[in-house]
Amino acid sequence: MYSRWPLHLMFLPGAILLLVYHYWPFVGFIIAFQDFIPAKGMFHSKWVGLDNFSYLLSLPNFYQVIWNTIYISVMKVIAGQLFPIVIAIMLNEVRIRFIKRSVQTLIYLPHFMSWVILGGIMIDVLSPTKGIVNQFLTMLGLEPVYFLGEPKLFPYVLVGSDLWKDFGFSTIVYLAALTSINPNLYEAAVMDGAGRWKQTWHITLPGMSPIIILMATLSLGQILNAGFEQVFNLYSPTVYETGDIIDTMVYRIGLVQAQYALATAVGLFKSVVSLVLISVSYYLAYRFANYRIF
């Protein structure tokens, strides 16, 4: 028993940080049920019960924000599942190791960049006057498109840029899954006359199915996380109609307008729904992919 004390001591700093920065802030959720006044503090502000939630549900744009969050998140989940699978299968067919590793490095590199950097790149690339995309459209005789200022296009810009940033990481996960497939299955398929497409359909995809199911089910818990950093660096008031999400709404209400109680109510609403979705996703991951936390 005493031999385990060094391991417990190594665990202690991480546990303290987790308690201080993740669990202690839960106390602040009582602000959602108060008419919070910073000068009085959260233990002396007036208790108003569910009034903040009632006001929140009466806001004309609240349901639009919920829809935007779900719509953008679902598109990100679908694109973030399908595209890396295709790229991983294509890379797995590359036999020249230098090319394969070079492509892996290039597609993985954006994952390490912050949205402050990538947001600036996207703004420059999609600029209606100097952006390379609109310059190309002008060369084709088409009118420039204001991608970051057109409400109908903005959600798809978010999905596309998010895919560009993170699909490299998912691709590596699926490439790792491909290494677990028995090569003898491909040799037997060749002996039976199966071409590349049939090998992919009957061997590769079934072999990847456990990790595909696992990644898909775990992503359900992120449905209400449409990406604050990304949206915050790319959106503007002209695209609030389709680009405003829960996290940016909390930012504006809480930090810009200083309505702390209302912002906390929005955050608590999101946390409760996210908890339900995460619980469902882990159940599905255990049910279909035999994935367990403990």
Image: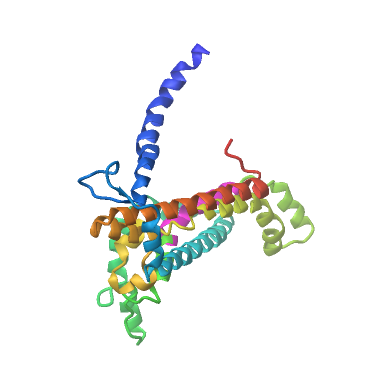
92 relative position to 202: left or right: left
| Chief secondary structure of the magenta portion | helix
Tell me if residue 243 can be seen.
yes
Placement of the C terminus among the 4 image quadrants: top right
- Compared to residue 56, the image places residue 11 above or below, namely above
Residue sticking out furthest to the right? 192
Left or right placement of residue 258 versus residue 143 in this view: left
- The answer to which quarter of the image holds residue 118 is bottom left
Give the residue at x 71% y 62%.
198
Q: Nearer the viewer, residue 239 or 233?
A: 239
Q: Quadrant of residue 121?
A: bottom left
Q: Vertically, is 12 above or below 229?
A: above
Q: Which residues are magenta?
A: 163-177
Residue 34: percent from left, percent from top: 33, 50
167 within the magenta span:
yes
- Residue 231 position, x and y percent, is 35, 62
Q: How is the image coloured?
A: rainbow
* 14 or 142, nearer to the observer: 14
Residue at screen point 32% across, 71% down: 126
User: Hey, which quadrant is residue 63 in on the image?
Assistant: bottom left
Q: Position of residue 91 (x, y in %)?
A: 54, 56
Q: Residue 35, percent across and down?
A: 29, 52
Tell which of 29 and 100 is nearer to you.
29
The vertical placement of 27 against 136, above or below, is above
**x 28%, y 69%: residue:** 236
Q: Can residue 97 be seen from the camera position used here?
A: no
